[in-house]
């Protein structure tokens, strides 16, 4: 039952993420009814239900028949499945069955991670559509990261390295940003590493860094091979989605990649 409720909750957050990503562009996040971005048609409640609305409208605006991007349905499903798995991931990582006193910390982590996933989905959708990172959303993630770090230091023994996790994770990219004067990497990526690094802590923050670099490099090479006429070494590819994917993989695998690399 908890998994089903979490899935429904995740679908709602995924739908909200799409709504915010759309409204960020026109700067009407907190005002006005939801509208079709093409014809301005005010959406009814039937057109705002996650998954169902997309299928009900056959992937088109009910009024102007403009085809809707499949990003809507896939992002809702992805958010739903990720948040549906959170209770299991958190209870397993914390060993709540053996340590029932951690139940309140587990609830905090559920709220923290589900909110972080929803905010990350907003950033991913916006970055893929507009090649820009919405800094207002990143700032919220950063504040959540600071809160997460403070609480983590109280729940566990104080660890100076973990308390600086966001800075440690972002350092390599910050170095590249400064020596290239922003030509090689974007400042948005540096802030994303910082915010998510604080949220997830160490050593998983280091794993997030490795995951994002490896996946980003693999995708970039694949694009240059498959679409060699469109992509080359100078082509711009949004990197923030890879950082977020690294965050998701680290959170759900609980892998300590740095330790594995050193021991092997």
Image: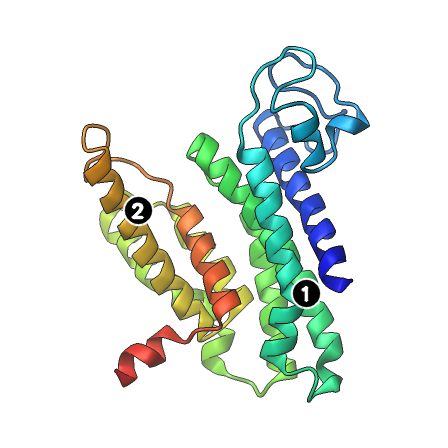
Residue 12, percent from left and from top = 71, 44
Residue 140 seen from this side: no
For this view, does 196 lie left or right of residue 59? left
Q: Residues within 10 Å of mark 2 (few under 14, many from 20)?
A: few
Q: Quadrant of the C terminus?
A: bottom left
Kindly report the distance in space between the C-alpha atoms of the residues bearing marks 2 and 1.
Answer: 30 Å
Residue at position x 28%, y 81% from top? 262
Q: Residues within 10 Å of mark 1 (few under 14, many from 20)?
A: some
The mark nearer the N terminus, 2 or 1, is 1
In this figure, which residue is indicated by the disc labeled 2? 219
Residue at position x 75%, y 18% from top? 42
Q: Say if 204 sits above or below 174 in the image.
A: below
Residue 190, percent from left and from top = 40, 53
Query: Is the Cβ of the residue at disc 2 closer than 8 Å to that at disc 1?
Result: no
Report helix, strand or loop for mark 1. Answer: helix
In this figure, which residue is indicated by the disc labeled 1? 110
Q: Quadrant of the N terminus?
A: bottom right
């Amino acid at each position: 039952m908890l998994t089903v409720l979490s899935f429904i909750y995740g679908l709602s957050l995924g739908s909200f993420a799409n709504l915010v990503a759309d409204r960020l562009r026109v700067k009407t996040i907190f005002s006005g009814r939801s509208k079709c971005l093409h014809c301005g048609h005010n959406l009814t409640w039937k057109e705002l239900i996650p998954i169902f609305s997309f299928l009900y409208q056959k992937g088109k605006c009910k009024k102007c028949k403009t085809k809707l991007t499949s990003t809507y349905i896939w992002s809702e499903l992805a958010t739903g499945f990720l948040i549906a798995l959170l209770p299991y991931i958190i209870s397993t990582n914390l060993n709540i069955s053996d340590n029932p006193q951690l139940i309140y910390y587990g609830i905090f982590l559920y709220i923290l991670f589900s909110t972080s996933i929803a905010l990350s989905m907003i950033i991913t959708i916006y970055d893929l559509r507009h090649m820009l990172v919405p800094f207002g959303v990143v700032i919220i993630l950063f504040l959540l990261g600071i809160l997460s770090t403070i609480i983590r230091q109280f729940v566990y023994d104080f660890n100076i390295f973990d308390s600086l996790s966001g800075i440690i994770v972002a350092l390599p990219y910050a170095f590249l940003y400064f020596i290239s004067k922003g030509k090689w990497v974007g400042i948005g990526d540096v802030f994303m590493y910082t915010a998510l690094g604080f949220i997830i802590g160490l050593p998983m923050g280091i794993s997030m860094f490795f995951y994002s670099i490896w996946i980003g490099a693999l995708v970039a090479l694949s694009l240059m091979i498959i679409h060699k006429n469109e992509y080359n070494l100078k082509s711009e590819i949004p990197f923030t989605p890879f950082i977020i994917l690294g965050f998701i993989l680290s959170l759900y695998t609980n892998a300590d990649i740095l330790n594995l690399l050193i021991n092997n």
